[in-house]
Image (cartoon, rainbow, N blue to C red):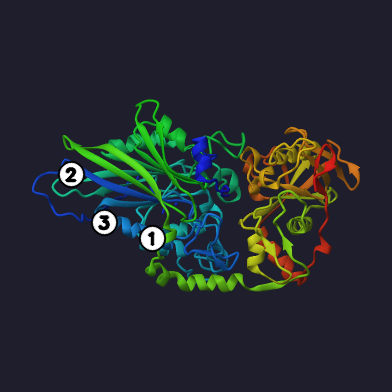
Amino acid sequence: MPVTPMNRREFMQKSAVTGAAVAAAGAVGTGTAQAADRKPEHTPRTWSFSILGTTDLHSHVFDWDYYKDAAYRDKAGNSVGVARVATLIRQQREAKGEGRVLLVDAGDIIQGTSLAYYYARVDPITGSGGRRGPRHPMAVAMNHMRYDAAALGNHEFNYGIDVLRKFESQCHFPLLGANALDAKTLRPAFRPYTVKRIRVPGAPDIKVGILGLTNPGIALWDKDNVSGKMVFPGLVEQARKYVPRLRALGCDVVFLTDHSGLDGSSSYGDELPYVENASNLVAQQVPGIDAILVGHTHVEVPSYTVKNEQTGEDVLLSEPYCWGMRLSVFDFEVELHHGQWRVTGKKAQTLDPKDVEEDPEITRLLKADHDLVVNYVNTPVGTCTQDLSAAESCWKDVPIMDFIHQVQMATVATGLSTADAALPLISVAAPFSRTADIPAGSVTIKDIAGLYIYDNTLYGKKLTGAQLKDYLEYAAKYYHQVPAGTKVDTATLTNANGFWDYMYDTAAGVDYEIDIAQPEGSRIKNLTYKGAAVTDDQVFVVAVNNYRANGGSGYPHIASAGSAYSSTNEIRQLMIDYVTAKGTLDPADFAVTNWRLTQAGTPVF
């Protein structure tokens, strides 16, 4: 699940961020770029080349918001989509020479938009009923753009391994994952690295080793898809294995593409022994790395250096935001010494594609796919009796969130055993989008998809009353402490502790207050179920999405809790089915104000 974007200034102030065909171990992919320069009269002693990088594209092809059915807009004036990035890449190749530019991605490619969902579930690339599936739009776009390699992102596994393998087969470049291993053999399930050659007329080729690393959190977040099939050791551990191998192969430059952020943090608490955002640790602890393309955390980091603790050499890192909003450019200067190229200079920057035109060839190739998905998301599924907005969902109990809770509880209730059905049933869910709005009148697929933007599935897990209180206390650290008598400003109230909206769960089925005047850990007050105080030993069935149920965001108890229900159906589709079946979405059927913010017992709103 992607992290909420942080702006560049905020990052630079902190100097860090919160941040698959099967090949045998050590398989080497080689590629040769065509030199655009004429052969010199003598052997050149110096050369320059660039590696361009994207990350977290999340199936954004065009500058379009499928949830809003309009061109993408944000307050910063960013554009999204690889169609514009492709133009920047063409410009870089024209300026520097075709043979001097490599193109790499750092993962999270095939999930994130309605376009991605359509080709995973509605008309899947794997085909259905004996019918051959279509080509994935991202494979089409990235093949046109001539990518040299891409790392696996955690969201590559959201639709299961079959979809990922089909996407891999459609790509003209390798998907790299040195720490994605077959669970039985512990051999690489994907190619760990590839070696590319930069042709230098009259001199030896420059050999660039590209190592791909993905996120260990896949083992938790997509447990249902990968358990017993793949394991995901740490980035540092696998980099220590493969960086020396690349050097032994004669690589002059070692470049890493990591689907992992920069600050050494993890959102899964103690559930895994490996660090989630480990790119800085890889740079610091593994000698022999020249540069790292960073991903996963959806921030813009134009240029960042980490000194390797063994060699004292600087490792250059860059992260190009997300969704095609930026392009990282790594420029290298190398010098020939006794037949071996050495890096003598390197720098990085990010380029903004918002002022260039979309690549007309990508438009030609994929406009029909785009139009098909636009028509799909505009399909009416029912009506709504009043406008339901998520604008205040991060600090008020609003009906649009109760819609999610209602669907989750109603679905789990139908699948419980007789014994578990006797237990009190509640729901937890997060406000994924403050801009979500289900309008009065006709309701379409996009209206619901805009509210529930992730492809999560549904679980029922069992927690005691004491564990539930711990869970809610953990959620309440989302709020900054505001002493009693101090005015509450919603603009600065939330996202404390690097806790983003998608990480903040509210509960339905129990009543409680969150006292924001109190310190973290003692904010949940008056926790009751049907008017009676919740007791420590009381057992609840909690309807919760798979990401959270498997340890996402580090909530206590939930990952190890007993399971009462699980489903492979996406919660978003369950919501669409709910409206379709009822015909009318009426908050009178489900809206209940059961939680509120207080200051020393006084309601804030």
Residue 558 image position (x, y, % from top left): 70, 41
Question: Total number of numbered labels?
Answer: 3
Circle 1 — which element?
helix
**Nearer the camera: disc 2 or disc 1:** 1
Residue 152 image position (x, y, % from top left): 46, 49
N-terminal label among 3 and 2: 3
Label 3 – label 1 distance at C-alpha:
14 Å
Residue type marked 2: Pro
- Residue where numbered disc 1 is placed: 86
Q: Is residue 188 visible?
A: no
Q: Quadrant of residue 269?
A: top right
Circle 3 — which element?
helix
Q: Residues within 10 Å of mark 3 (few under 14, many from 20)?
A: some
Which residue is at the front of the view, 374 or 509?
374
Label 3 – label 2 distance at C-alpha:
18 Å
Left or right, residue 594 beside residue 477: right
Residue 286 image position (x, y, % from top left): 40, 31
Residue type marked 1: Ala
N-terminal label among 3 and 1: 1
Circle 2 — which element?
loop
Left or right, residue 277 beside residue 543: left
Residue 204's label in the rendered image is 2
- Residue where numbered disc 3 is placed: 98
Residue 247's label in the rendered image is none
N-terminal label among 2 and 1: 1
Q: Quadrant of residue 292?
A: top left
